[in-house]
Image: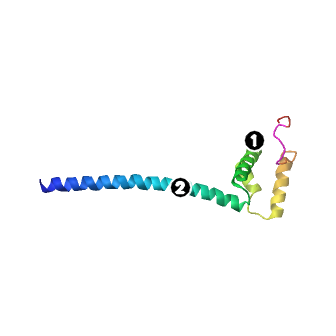
Amino acid sequence: MGIYTEKRDHLIEKIKGLEKRIASDTAKKKTLEDKLKDVSRLAMAEEYNCKPRELDEIITSEHQILEKLRASGLSDEELLKLVGSGNAENEKSNTSALAADFGQQMSFTDKANPHED
């Protein structure tokens, strides 16, 4: 056997070893990412002092509220102003001004269509 044939065979073996390690590391990475997702969800539930199932309901509810506000004509910029980092008094005046612009104040519990059930 020639010297280059031996080097080639050695490199092929190294590549095969690396491919096995990559496959193993990729599987370990996926497992850790799944655990991270679960732990992050539990941490968020802990932060909001609720159970994970309740967290799902909260997120769904808040998303529906956001969609209703957008459907009522509020832009993302206006929504950001509503939840901006200003003081509480400033936020109240922003909310009142926006409600006056629409002629009535919409409660977060109001349905978009009062005839829906």
Q: Name the element at disc 1.
A: helix
Spot occupied by residue 32 in the image (x, y as percentages of width and height): 52, 57
Residue at left 30%, top 53%?
A: 15
Residue 39 spot, x, y in % from top left: 61, 58
Q: Which mark is residue 33?
A: 2
Tell whether label 1 touches label 2 (CB within 8 Å).
no
Magenta residues span 108-113
Which structural element holds mark 2? helix
Residue drawn 42% across the image and 56% down it: 25
Residue at the extreme bottom: 87
**Dot 2 crowding, Cα within 10 Å, few <14, some 14–19, many 20+:** few
Please give the residue where the numbered disc 1 appears in the rendered image. 71
- Residue 116, image quadrant: top right
Look at the magenta stretch and give its main secondary structure: loop
Query: Which residue, as the protein is rendered here, is positioned at the far left?
Result: 1
Residue 19's x, y, as percent? 35, 52
The kind of residue tagged 2 is Glu
- Identified at 16% across, 52% down, the residue is 5
Q: Which tag, 2 or 1, sits closer to the chain's start?
A: 2
Residue 112 drawn at (x, y percent): 81, 40
In the image, is residue 24 part of the stretch drawn in magenta? no
Q: Residue furthest top?
A: 115
Across the whole image, how many numbered discs are drawn on residues? 2
